[in-house]
Amino acid sequence: MLIPTTCFNCESACGLLAHVAKDDLTVTKVEGNPAHPGSRGRNCAKGPATINQVNDPERILHPLKRAGKRGDGQWQQCSWDEALNDIAARIRAAIIEDRRDEVIYHVGRPGEDGFAERFLAAWGVDGHNSHTNICSAGARLGYTLWGGYDRPSPDYANAKVVLLLSSHLEAGHYFNPHAQRIMEAQHDGGAKLVVLDPRMSNTASKADLWLAPWPGSEAAILLAVAAHLLATGNIDRDYLRRWVNWTTYLQRLHPDADVDFDTFVAKLTQDYSRYTFDFAAAEAKVPAEKIRQLAEIVAGGGNALSAHVWRSATAGNLGGWQVARCLFFLNVLTGSVGTPGGTSPNGWDKFIPHGFSVPPGHDVWNELSWPGEYPMSTNEMSILLPHFLAEGRGKVDVYFSRVYNPVWTNPDGFSWVESLSDPDQVGLHIALTPTWSETATFADYVLPMGHSTERHDTHSYETHAGRWLGFRQPVRRVAMDKLGIDYTDTRDANPGEVWEENEFWFELSWRIDPDGALGIRKYFESPYRPGEKVTVDEWYRWIFENRVPGLPEKAAAEGFSPLEYMRKYGVVEVAKDIYRQDERPLTAEELDGAVADEQGVLRKPSDDESTPPLVGEAGSVGVQLDDGSQVAGWLTPSRKLELYSTAMADFGWPEQAAPGYIESHVSHHQVDTDKGEMVLVPTFRLPTLVHTRTGNAKYLNEISNTHPIWVNASDAERLGLATGDLVRVNTRIGHYVARVWAHQGIRPGVIAMSHHMGRWRLTEGSGSRWATGLVHLDHPSDGVWRMRYAEGVGPFASEDPDSGRIYWEDPGVHQNLAFPVQPDPLSGMHCWLQKVTLTKAEPGDRYGDVVVDTRKSGEVYREWLALTRPGPNAEGWRRPEFLMRPVTPRRKAFKVKQ
């Protein structure tokens, strides 16, 4: 049987078809699903490698409970009932005793939008914690300030110019769906591809123009392009007049000027004239003519500029959020917003269907995740949790880590080890994971959750100018349905006792509130069988019948119920060719009771602070434009694109209210080359590996199994180094030992190392031997940690004969351990780029060694904390309402109690 599901090895959620044998329900192969509108039947290497994860001989098959100290690797098998009852009792006590900020659910890649938010809201806890501030907080803030949406959705297929920052095509969001459309635009439509990246990536190798700027200078380059567009008149005046808050720009920055559009254009041109090609060239250390060439390419693209940045420069630098702000500035100036070939906000192309009886917002504000120092953070300040706990700001009684591995993925991992090892800081740690990880080693329970062919999720991503909803499903369970084989829940279909999250959260919520007295259980009761616990089939049946436009009709046309349709195809196309949703006329229902304020913002007045914030801010539903049209607009306070962000000014940063250039902490002005300082770029990744989940995929590790540090050949010669030499990379808090790869594919003065190797295990059986090395971890003095490999990767005996054929040896280097936390004072984004020195390895050094002093990491944390301007604002608001916030509380929680 061919049964559709979706990939879970990155966020793209490309369609998969699983081959399931009818005789024994074995999953023999996975390949692309041609019915999927996003991936269109194609997959990268990570998709087919799902079969490795399913059949991994070292996967976790049963619930485990810690038997010794955390990190000792001593486990005993336990029952699901034992684990559920223990966890539920802890959470129930925290709720009853009003310790609701002591329950934290820490997720990396959620897989399904809105589900975790549901159970946390039902519990009444402000406990959502994400990986956003090690991934995308910088880009999110930059984009949100413009339009209230936190990421872009380029229409690559129809673009005339594609502008990418860093190795986005093969290593970012969303590799496979985006790559195929970019190649179509380039080869079929003649689009120009421009890449800014200090490293010669696979993407850069396909570019018509590649610029290798000094890291952190990207905003200067983009502003020089903006200045050129303004100076030459290559701007869409009608679009700017209609959709930019230009009157606010004039009133705030030029209060004495006439408030008319021509004056605005003149003042804007004057304000940005200082960003010359020569200025940008000096900052970026690239020829001014190359920047002029970029500007002319952008100008020639008209309103068909598809541009994207996600991690890369926005995640690497102090002020990196301004890179995203400046990139979208080019879209706005050219009118390439929501146009064919332009760039839309993700919310136009992404679709999130919510379940029945949505729980109301809670009234708790968790300062461990949303501290007052970071009112503009996008989103939770998760990287600072160990420091906050060490400072005594609070404690965590129940901590879930799910599809997340902070010990390995986050900077300053030894501080995480210290917190997770201390039961006074973290009372009970539950790792929800199908595979071993460095973080699961320090858990109290390890509970096995299914891979992408073993679980249910719905998901939708902005892969193109269309909207679709995918359906990940446990394929053996679907096969059992087709064959008439009985089962109770997904555990009966999966190997061992592997479960899926949705059923787990239903059951856990039911046990937290067994009699319904806490008001939790009602949100997990069946809409078809009142008073009974909802099943996963009923959950998705209700969503597909009630929340997905067009699905019931499409299903009926083929003689299916909506759930049967989704089980057959694994996806539904909700809409196609989506453009200019800002101009969508408001419905009579939306307009009912709405009144336009002096800026034209249409609001439904309400003083009820018990409700969560409505769309936009303070109940706004749209905007009335100068021509009288009443349309949806944007999600900002003004419901327009905010060239001048009033929120930024109101929360203490007026000098950053408009797109501008912030000098990075690693700009060449800050690097002392006489002392041997260089810039380390640790943010790129390989297109075949992604965080923890691909560690147990043998196909992928066979493809990618070396982890060199990229060094320009001229730098290597200057330092007396050659390819293969061992070097120390010295950071503010310690050092690690790596091997050199000397070549011309990276700009001088900059070194780079990929993010997706360096996996390790403390004991046998606590990590995948396809990818991890066994390490000794020493803690010889207070704060000092030393890690050394005892053995690398090598062949081992297992049920899979391929494990005996492993020929690679390199587990990589866990470089993140040696990075202190460096949170941007506005976005909260960890600034990944490091100012380092590169020296020859010393006697006794061995490959992969890491030495760190967490006392020094605490010092660096306090230095960066001092850069902030804490809230609340003058009106007592903790943060702007329109900024995204998972599990949004009631409005009254946004205000500091007087």
Image (cartoon, rainbow, N blue to C red):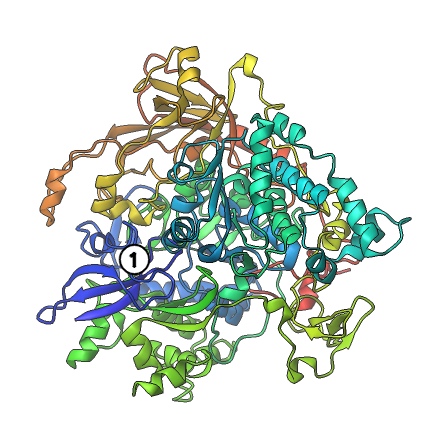
Q: Position of residue 695 (x, y in %)?
A: 28, 45
| Quadrant including the C terminus | bottom right
Residue 282 against residue 627 in the figure, above or below: above
Residue marked by disc 1: 42
Q: How many labels does the image show?
A: 1
| Residue at 50% in and 51% down | 160
**Is residue 771 shown to the viewer in this render?**
no
Q: Position of residue 68 (x, y in %)?
A: 30, 46
**Camera-nearest residue between 247 and 452:** 247
**Is residue 185 shown to the viewer in this render?**
yes
Q: Is mark 1 on a helix, strand or loop?
A: loop
183 to the left or right of 78: right
Tell me the amino acid under the disc marked 1. Arg
439 to the left or right of 610: left
Dot 1 crowding, Cα within 10 Å, few <14, some 14–19, many 20+ = some
| Residue at 10% in and 42% down | 797
**Camera-nearest residue between 384 and 694:** 694
56 to the left or right of 435: left
Residue 286 against residue 131 in the figure, above or below: above
Quarter assignment of residue 539: bottom left
Q: Where is residue 601 in the image (x, y as percent from the top left)?
A: 75, 69
| Quadrant including the N terminus | bottom left
Quarter assignment of residue 729: top left
**Camera-nearest residue between 569 and 280:** 280
Quarter assignment of residue 246: bottom right
**Camera-nearest residue between 90 and 709:** 709
Q: Where is residue 512 in the image (x, y as percent from the top left)?
A: 44, 71
